[in-house]
Image: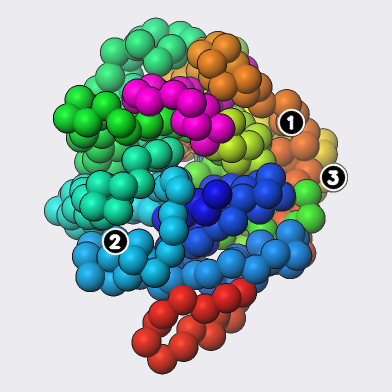
Amino acid sequence: MTILVTGGAGYIGSHTCVELLQSGYEIIVLDNFSNSKPKSLKRVSEITGKSFKTYQIDLVNRNKLEDVFSQNKITAVIHFAGLKAVGESVQIPLEYYHNNLTGTINLCEMMRKYEVKKLVFSSSATVYGSTGDLPIAENSRLGATNPYGRTKLMIEEILRDLYESDHNWSIALLRYFNPIGAHSSGLIGEDPKGIPNNLMPFISQVAVGKLECLNIYGNDYSTKDGTGIRDYIHVVDLAIGHIRALENLENNNGIEAFNLGTGTGYSVLDLVNAFEKATGESIPYVMKERRPGDAAVCFADPTKAMEQLGFKATRSIEMMCEDTWRWQKTNPNGYTGNLELNRKDQATVL
Ligand code: WQD
């Protein structure tokens, strides 16, 4: 079974590659390295002792994308590749729509042409917008509130239409809540470009001394301590959720959405306190105004993934903090160095 992993060099992609290889799958990674580093893939090989092909390709490049399908026998696809910064998507919506939608349509057209009809799609809890339901279930009202979230919602609709046109497709839409943490080896982890938008990488960069102080956006929400509540899920649990979803596609045609979350919400201050306790590092912070577009509380109803995929997140908030810190302190500047790709940017075996 050979799985094509688009965006496989990214944070969630690289952790999923580790779990795929350790579950006995062959993988091929496709990444344009616009928001990831080739070194993450060398680290995947280091962790697993396995090698795999990597193509440095942009999904909007149809000809290069076809090479991947014509040169390999692909069984299924896990599709991570896409731009994913909420704030940036508001600034450059056209690039987000082109990159995320055109890239996905190109991918699906190639899958159809080469008769590859099993797809796991990296969606997001951001498709729920501000539903009001808590916990959020898969049948909660959908309504993205930013261009990034709208690309995820539109892709979900495109995939539903694709399935309606051909019931030989098997598609899983995985809606992530808040992935944090890192592989226990400390060799792979989150390596955001520039100043992190998300809470945990910001905390860990304060802890390692790259950033001075955490800004906590809003302490006047109607929550137990006034700060925002989210459903943090360990990235390794999230990666395992992709393996369960892939297995489920084996015998099930159709298209289904699944929440990947823990069902437990933690506030910003909960996470700061947990990180300080787990690492012994202190995190100075200042309270700031709310961040536009932030919901007060967001956490998953994880029942459907448990019942239909046999998936349940098991790693604690303490482990999420410990594993984040191990990655950050051993890689204070994230990944460095470049993968040597041959002259034509063709596949190279790592
Ligand atoms: C979490 C909490 C902030 C940073 C985002 C995307 C979502 C998904 C996950 C892709 C909130 C607070 C944050 C900081 C803070 N990504 N915060 N100071 O916004 O829940 O979700 O990442 O799919 O699409 O929207 O995650 O980590 O940015 O924020 O106080 O420096 O931490 O207000 O309450 P979010 P986050």
Residue type for callout 3 = Gly
- The crowding category of the residue bearing disc 1, from other C-alpha atoms within 10 Å (few below 14, some 14 to 19, many at least 20), is some
Residue numbers of the magenta segment:
245-264
Q: Which mark is residue 64?
A: none
Marks 2 and 1: which is nearer the front?
A: 2
**What residue does disc 1 label?**
315
Measure how far apart labels 1 and 3 are at the Cα level. 20 Å
Mark before the other along the chain sequence, 2 or 1: 2
Identify whether 305 is placed above or below 2: above
The reply to whether residue 133 is in sight is yes
The reply to whether the C-beta atoms of the residues labelled 2 and 1 are less than 8 Å apart is no
**Which of 247/318 is in front?**
247
**What residue does disc 2 label?**
59
Q: Secondary structure at mark 2?
A: loop
Residue type for callout 2 = Leu
**What residue does disc 3 label?**
280
Number of dots carrying numbers: 3
Mark before the other along the chain sequence, 2 or 3: 2
* Residue 18 at x, y percent in the picture: 66, 53
Q: Secondary structure at mark 3?
A: loop
Q: Quadrant of residue 326?
A: bottom right
* Residue 344 at x, y percent in the picture: 37, 87
Say whether mark 1 is within 8 Å of ligand 1: no
Which residue is outermost to the bottom? 343
